[in-house]
Amino acid sequence: MKGGARAGRRRLRVDDVTVVDRSMLHRAIGGTVVGNTMEWYDIGIYGYLAVTMGRVFLPGADPGMQLLFSLGVFASTYLARPIGGVFFGRLGDRVGRQKVLAATLILMASATFLIGVLPDHGAVGALAPVLLVVLKLIQGFSTGGEYAGATTFVSEYAPDARRGFFGSLLDFGSYLGFALGAAVVTVVQLSTTGEQMLDWAWRIPFLFGGVIGSVAVYFRLKIEESPAFQATQDEHEASSDARAEAEGRPKNSLQLVRRHWRPMVIAVALVAAANSVGYALTSYMPTYLTDSLGYDPLHGTLLTIPVLVVLALFLPVAGRVSDRVGRRPVMWFGGGWMIVLGLPIFWLIGRGDVVTTLVGLVMLAVPVACWVACQASALPALFPTSSRYGGMGISFNVAVAVFGGTTPLIVEALVQATGNDLVPAVYLMATSVVGAIGVFFMRESAQRPLPGAMPSVASEEEAHELVATQDENPLFDVAELPFPASSGDGVRSGSTPA
């Protein structure tokens, strides 16, 4: 018998359930998706311009050193992300998700635009690469709060039964942003000569990023705070200081890690698998095709654009499947695919034929879709509302710093050291094993309320049905629900804390 049926237990009532306001949900989704699009647009243009950026900011070095410098700058961005994750995560759990997400986007867009107006090595000498690193570190600091905040925000807005689908829309925007970055770089490459590209044309994608960022900031400022966070805030205000300290958010990051280290370790494992294969496909593959396999920069870019578009379109499908069958089975499939087919995938890519390269890239996109589509809904479900942004900010960004942004640098260094073009496959297979271990220890979260939150549904009819079937419902235990101190007589709206 479920906990709600036991004598003396507080039972779920209709007014305990949040009915999501669709218009607010759509605004929340739109406001967060445009931010993710902006973030990955910047990642995309830098990844596709990696060879060019090395020549512009380190013109006197040999080509191998220029490439390692450019990828090293890219990796340094991710070393700053854990710091931003800690800072913005703690801030987001205190002052709200919406305010922090607006601030991170403004910082990110400003840094992207400023890269476009940086003086090059010919103008200021060694100061040029230093300024580039500084701006990329600012981007890393701001993006440290971006994805963790966006996934937290959307997961708290979405109804329980469709959290996988709505969460996957974030990464749908991410990969469309990456494809947009690739398209902009391609247009610039087709419109200019190689000399013009090195002289001034490389700036255009970054300057255009400032325009995209301004639009994204406008949409983000239109969204409201999430119901789950507002409910937690109301409970803290209604409770005593002693209760808030005992049951509420941790007082500092050290206490946060001590209290939630188990879900953090699981999150790191999942992000390691998702982002290593994801960044290999997006940020490293243009460089791999150009530098290791001999494709010219234009074809190296063009080959990946259709794959990214198909991947973006497939993400919501995979997210919806995870709502039906669970996050764990979808992640198991993605991890197993990479472990079993990793070597054949890179063998196909490395044959040098356009058709086999495209087939290999599409096969590489399959585990990316399985991991990434579930990431935005599975990770927030590891943490309670009062610590969700902070827990996500630390664990996600530490994992991305170690396994994500450094993936292009690590695999390129391995390729140069071994001379073996199949080495990237071995690395991705290893991170997939790490991710599979994380899935093994992860609790299934599909169709279930988030920890520290009451059930969330799409309609009043669903709310009544949930209450009527609470004793037989296998998806949650009423005894584990955080009932509010008081409740009204009606169904809770998505605009009202739950």
Image (cartoon, rainbow, N blue to C red):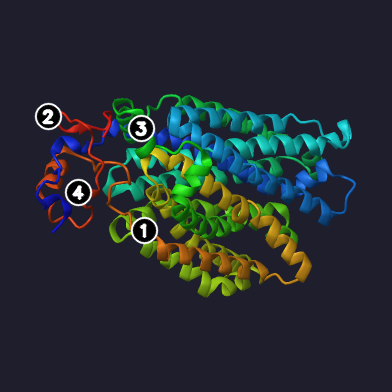
Left or right: 291 as drawn, with respect to 454: right
**Marks 1 and 2, how far apart at CA:** 35 Å
> Marks 1 and 4: CB-CB under 8 Å?
no
**Marks 2 and 4, how far apart at CA:** 19 Å
Q: Which mark is residue 327?
A: 1
The residue that label 2 is drawn on is 489
Left or right: 125 as drawn, with respect to 297: right
Secondary structure under tag 2 reads: loop
The residue that label 3 is drawn on is 242
Q: Earlier in the sequence, mark 2 or mark 4?
A: 4
Q: Nearer the viewer, mark 4 or mark 3?
A: 3
**How far across and down, in percent of the image, does residue 288 sit?**
69, 60
Say which residue appears at 71% left-offset and 40% top-offset. Answer: 191
Q: Nearer the viewer, mark 2 or mark 3?
A: 3
The residue that label 4 is drawn on is 478
> Marks 2 and 4: CB-CB under 8 Å?
no
Few, some or many residues within 10 Å of mark 3 (<14, 14–19, 20+): few
